[in-house]
Structure formats: structure tokens, C-alpha cells
Image (tube, grey):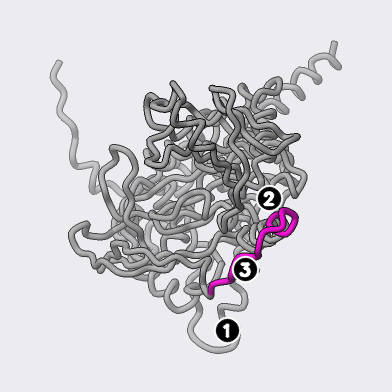
Amino acid sequence: MLKKQDMSKRDQIGFYSLDDPVPQEHLLRDIDKYVDFNFIYELVEDKYDENNGRPSLDPVLLIKLPLIQYLYGIKSMRQTIKDIEVNVAYRWFLGLDMKDSVPHFSTFGKNYSRRFRGTDIFEQIFYGVLDQCVGAQLVDTSEVFVDGTHIKAHANNKKYESTDVTEESLFYIKSLQEEVEKDREKRLKKPLKRKIGSDLKVKKKKVSTTDNESGWFHKGEHKQVFAYATQVACDKNGWVLGYTTHPGNQHDSRTFIFLYDKLKSHFTLDKLIMDAGYKTPGIAHKLFEDDLIPVFPYKRPMTKKGFFKKYDYVYDEYFDRYICPNMKTLNYTTTNREGYKEYKSNPNDCSSCPFITSCTESKNKTKLIMRHLWEDEMERCEDIRHSLGMKQLYGIRKQTIERLFGTAKEFHGLRYTNMIGKEKMHMKIGLTFACLNIKKLAKILKLRDQKDSIFFAYFCVLIQK
């Protein structure tokens, strides 16, 4: 039997509670029950005047607006407000009834400009949520996974200027210079002349005229775009522990120290699991200096095809020299500014060597091998890599940090941004990862309550028997 919908119900008047249309299993119900947002009032207390001005919009409601946007991957605040106007669950979560007017889409932007710009309020919100995860005894920082990902910037790839940009000095440059001076003094070498600004390198780089705080990103077969990079850390259970924001053209090994300092200030660390981009002598030296265990993967030697790898040359620690595959020696010559000890072969040995075509293309028939002053730390990293269980531990990365990036980009709008400027980008990244922790916290605490209620019911049945 064909039935037609009665459209007159649109004009029907009834008495309903706003709580009725929201499903009991709705995610926002779980978040409202298990996540406490009242800590936001204390964070913004000094941003409002208690005696002057009109009554403000509830700060918690104000922060919940972008949380809804990033929680559901809505593209813009304008679209978020449109969705809130017609979505009963969103209104319920914000504490608005059907007659309350939804804030204008520019409300959050104006409050950001007037109250929150230049502050770390959104990072404090992230850590406020994380503190609740820690309080629920869900976070384990004994094994921390660190990685970086890129987010496409809101910048036209064809609008840029080629500008001389000064790179920041490496975080370990001072300690490395001291090591170089000590090594040269021990070997009776003249001290290197100090050059003013020698640790600051100037390079020609593309700078966007749309967003000059982004960076030109090109990796492998990836499309070349202006982008931002974020360094993120999580534990083995997938809880985001910290994040930093940088231009997309800065390498992970340079930006690592900013995230590492944040992690050290908030948590007690034991093992740091990172990919090959972080496998540098400076990072290894820093982690061993702080009594931490770095877990790195195998890194393929950057050698031309058909030539001997560096591991084909045996280092003789006693005589401080290298021995080549033809059993000839490469002796120490000097220690350069970058902290590398240089070992060179005898041209007379190389000129008659049958392996020279697989060894060097040097015109003067001399093979050069460089060994970093902190090479011992790199060898310790290799020993750790071959230790029992470390390969399996590194394999967990795809279930933790890489899964976080995939979820954030696919479902929470972190693949690209419509915001301009590093500060706004830092806010977006912080609130997005706060949303991931919020969603995870609400679901786990709900499951915990369900298990407790089942156990309690079973216990009551046992008592009755």
C-alpha cells in the first residue's frame, strides 16, 4: 500500500525537552558527562573585567564553538554556526535552547583578537584536558613516540618572493664547539678561528606573500606547497602529550628540541621512539646526556650506488684510524667546525688499489672518511636497536603516532588550514589534538563505568545467592 507523508506535522505544536531529541549514545553526551570544562574559567579570568563592560558570552561556550568545529571536521567557523543553528545536539552541548540565538560566526574571531591573541590560552586548554587524562590514570609516559607531519597552508603557491633567510643555529652548537676545541687541543691542533655569526647560515628561500610564516615544503614525490609542520608526541596508548608548530621547511631534527623541552617540563620520560629523521649525533647525545633511551630505526647509508658503504671501513679505536677493504689505513688529519674528524688515505696506496672504482672518485686518489665526535652515541643507538624487543617497540609507531595523524587529517580537518599565521595555526593544532584526547577520554571512561556497573550487578546477584 502506497503511503504519503503527512507534511502538516511541520506546523504541529508540542511540549518537548531539549534533552529528548539527543540520543543517549551521542558522543557529546559522553563528553559533557566525563570531561570537565570548568577549568577554562580560571584560565580566562584575567582576560575579563569584573566591574566594567557588558556581560560577556560564557567563556566555556566560546571555547566549545571551535571544539565542535574540530571535533566534527567542519571546514569553517561560519559553517559551524550554521550547523549549530539546526543541530539539536550541538545546542544541547552548548546549553542553548531552541529560542536562544546562536553567536555570530565572527564572535570567536573578535574574542581571539581582543583577548586571546599573544597568549598561550589554547595550549593551556590542551594541557587542562590532558591533566584529566593523567588524573584518570590512563597516560603512560615510559614509552613516548615522537613524529612530525605537514599541514597545507592557506597560501597561493604562485605568490612568493625569493628572500635571504637566516637559519636558526642548532640547539647543540655551543656544546659541539666546546667538544671541537677540546679535541683539537688534545691532538695539538691550532684552535679554529671564531667567525662572527658562523653558526648562522643564510639561504635563499621561497617566502609566501600570502602567509609569510609558512614554509615551502617538498619531500620526495609530494607536491610542492607552502605548509606548516607540527611536532607531536604521544604515549603507547595514543594520548597526545605535546605539540609544537613550525614553518613547513624546517627539518624535524631542528625543531625536535622545542617539543622535547615541553615534554621534559611536564612528564618523566624513559624511552623516546622516533623515525630516521631524528637520528642525528646531536639528538642522540642530548638524550643520552639526560639518561634517556632513544629508539631509532635502521638508516640507509647515503652512498652512491656501486660504492663501498661506510660500514665497509673498519674503525680501529686503539690507533684511531680506519682500515679499508684492501687492508690499507686511513689516518686522522683534522677536526672540522661541524664536529667531524677527518681520516684520509695515502694516495700511493689508492693509486694501485684494485677497488678504487668502488671506493672514491677523488682526482688526487685520496679516500676521505668523516667520523663525528659523538659517533659513539650513534653506535649506542645501534646497540639499542638490536636489543631484545626494540624492533617490536618501534613497530608500534603505526598504531600510535601515525594513526593519530591519519585520524586528525581524515576526520578532524587537519589536512589543510584556512588560517593565516603561525599563532592561529598553533591554536588550531592544539584544539584539534585536545579534541582527540577529549573523544578518547569520554569513550574510555564510559566503558569503565559500564564494566563497573556490570561487575556491581554480578556482585549483587552473588550476595543474594
In the rendered image, the vertical position of residue 209 relative to residue 235, given as above or below: below
Pointer 1 residue: 49
x and y, in percent, of residue 395 in the image: 56, 25
Q: Nearer the viewer, mark 2 or mark 1?
A: 2
* Residue drawn 28% across the image and 58% down it: 154
Amino acid at the residue labelled 1 = Asp
Tell me how far mark 2 sits from mark 1, CA to CA.
Answer: 45 Å
Pointer 2 residue: 286
What is the tally of numbered marks visible in this picture? 3
N-terminal of the pair, mark 2 or mark 3, is 3
Pointer 3 residue: 43
x and y, in percent, of residue 381 in the image: 66, 34
Frontmost residue, 398 versus 132:
398
Q: Is residue 10 left or right of residue 41?
A: left
* Residue drawn 75% across the image and 22% down it: 455
Q: Residue furthest top?
A: 465
SS for dot 3: helix
In the rendered image, the vertical position of residue 279 relative to residue 452, given as above or below: below
Look at the image and say whether residue 28 sits in the magenta stretch.
no
SS for dot 1: loop
Tell me how far mark 2 sits from mark 3, CA to CA.
Answer: 34 Å
